[in-house]
Amino acid sequence: MIKRIVTAAILIIIMALGIWFQGWPLRVILLTSMLMSTSEMYRAFRRINYDPVRWSGYVYCVLAVLAQAYYATLNDASLFASISPAMFALIIGLLLAMTVIVFKGKVAFDSLMSTVFPMLYPGLFFSLIITLQDLNTRTASTLALILTFFIASVNDTFALFIGLRFGKHKLSPEISPKKSVEGSIAGLISSVLFAMLVPWVTGMIAANHPQIAADLAASPLPPLWAFGVLGLIAGGLSQIGDLVASLVKRHCGIKDFGTIFPGHGGMLDRMDGILFCGVACYVFFKIYGL
């Protein structure tokens, strides 16, 4: 448990620094995480004798980050401003992978699926998170990134400790035997409260911070109840993300995707819930035009 706590603290500091600086420091952190997560997924598939075209997935990762960086420099009148960089990179990556596999001249469906799946998860989900630092204002971007990275962490923490203490009913015994219904409910409640707390604190800080106040005046935030709904959905998706990752690991016969983080496993073990949470935050902030 000590290793898990120390590792979590270090990861929180890295994520906090990325959110604080944003720009290329955050892009590099996310690109590194994306490449590592994709590599871990490919390695898991190779353990069951699938043969993914790994380099096409890595090309997609780099292209996704570069496309978003270029997109952020465009104005609304640009010809390419209306093209989603996440979808552009994904389409190029998928076409590249399918072309390479077809030209092998073999009926390699396992190779196709094991190449394409990591481009969608974790690939596309990372691409959506990358776009969150390019919202209308820096305040909106910072808020979106904080919610993306930390709703899942708050959810995991409360689900773990409440589940250990009070968990009696299994949530998904075949996929993840240790998760409980009681822990899941605690995680959802904590996610809702955290999602409402962050914008409330932001509003309080704005009273003494002219730049934040100006950002909020230019792009007002949704009401607190909407953030509560976001917390519920993002928390639920975070738990689904954990279960999806567990499902893949069960299928591939592995306990963790990697060993780089003591007490946590691999990069994808740490990012699984965050990636699904990021999808919810992406949709939420886009719906409200931020």
Image (tube, rainbow, N blue to C red):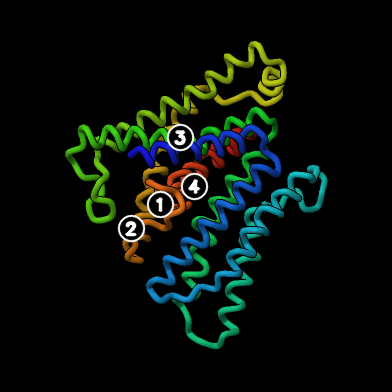
Badge 1 element: loop
Mark 2 touching mark 1, by CB under 8 A? yes
Q: Amino acid at mark 2?
A: Lys
**Quadrant holding the N terminus:** top left
Q: Residue at x 76, y 48 (%)?
A: 81
- Amino acid found under the numbered disc labelled 3: Ile
User: Of marks 1 and 3, which one's residue comes earlier in the chain?
Assistant: 3
Residue 151, which numbered label?
3
Q: Which residue is mark 1?
A: 265
The residue sitting at 36% across, 35% down in the picture is 157
Q: Secondary structure at mark 2?
A: loop
Q: Residues within 10 Å of mark 4 (few under 14, many from 20)?
A: many
Q: Which mark is residue 137?
A: none
Lower sequence index among marks 2 and 1: 2
Q: Is residue 154 left or right of residue 106?
A: left
Q: Earlier in the sequence, mark 4 or mark 1?
A: 1
Separation (CA) of disc 1 from disc 3? 20 Å
Q: Earlier in the sequence, mark 3 or mark 2?
A: 3
Q: Residue 255's mark?
A: 2
Mark 4 vs mark 1, foreground winner is 1
